[in-house]
Amino acid sequence: MGVSAEALIVDALQRAVTAPEGLPLFGSKTAPGLFAHHAAGKLAALACKDRGLLHVVRTAARGRATLEYCALTEQGWRHLLEQASPKPILSALLAALERHHAAFGAQQQILVAIRTAVERLQQHLERPAPPFPGSANGQPAPADAVREALTAWRATDTLGDCPLPELLRRMRQRLPKLTIGAFHDALRRLHEERALYLHPWTGALYEMPDPAAALLVGHEVAYYASLRET
């Protein structure tokens, strides 16, 4: 049984996520592309462009033919997030980020674009749940739960800053329905209010445990948190 056109499209969009500078619409033996140069690939590529999921960012001559380099559009992003799980895409983005980091100089714009894509996927990993009912049922707001969890962490004999996955685990003991999006929103709010420090991950990105809990802050991937001294 052959692969459906929709499966070919989703596969192409997943590859396009990690190449914001554009990939060839059709691959060759020496240059991998978004679609294979066969009948099914050509039909899927045509459908992809007609639906506005990809757009041409540049062209290059290849013999007598013109090679189109394509990148994901906003519509393509929406379609991909509706059709595919964000987690493997996030893993691929983190691997791409690590590769480009090794050759940072000329790749700075690509790095920024990939970081933006990583943040977008992190926010999509869990769709927002209905708002918490607030203090009426005794539950704290997420920002207050962050303070409580970090205060408890600091009160123990544990040395060092609190890893964000551990902070999220502790908060979910109080707020079982807490999403990663709401967790990150609370961290950003407290960081902007200068109520806590966010510390970066300093190792290789592909070695990061539970990367979904990490948070992009500026050009750094924050992975630890600590309360500011008052």
Image: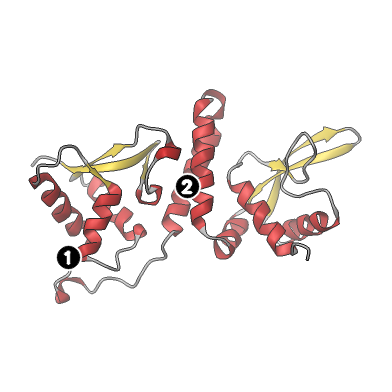
Q: Percent from the top left, x then y, of residue 26? A: 78, 45
Marks 1 and 2, Cα distance to the nearest angstrom? 29 Å
The answer to whether 63 is drawn above or below residue 89 in the figure is above
The answer to whether 167 is drawn above or below residue 63 in the figure is below
In the picture provided, is 230 more to the left or to the right than 4? left
Q: Which image quadrant for residue 225?
A: top left
Which residue is situated farthest in the front direction here? 1
- Residue drawn at point x = 52 percent, y = 44 percent: 93
Q: Which image quadrant for residue 58?
A: top right
Which residue is situated farthest in the top direction here? 105
- Residue pointed to by mark 1: 140
- Residue pointed to by mark 2: 118
First in sequence: mark 1 vs mark 2? 2
In the picture provided, is 162 more to the left or to the right than 221? left
Q: Percent from the top left, x then y, of residue 202? A: 35, 32
Pointer 2 local density, CA inside 10 Å: few below 14, some 14–19, many at least 20: many
- Residue drawn at point x = 27 percent, y = 55 percent: 168
Amino acid type assigned to the residue bearing label 1 in the image: Pro
- Residue drawn at point x = 78 percent, y = 66 percent: 1
Residue 86 visible to the viewer: yes
Amino acid type assigned to the residue bearing label 2 in the image: Val
Q: Quadrant of the C terminus?
A: top left
Residue 52 visible to the viewer: no
Question: At numbered mark 2, what does the secondary structure look like: helix, strand or loop?
Answer: helix
The colour mode here is: secondary structure
Q: Percent from the top left, x then y, of residue 28? A: 80, 39
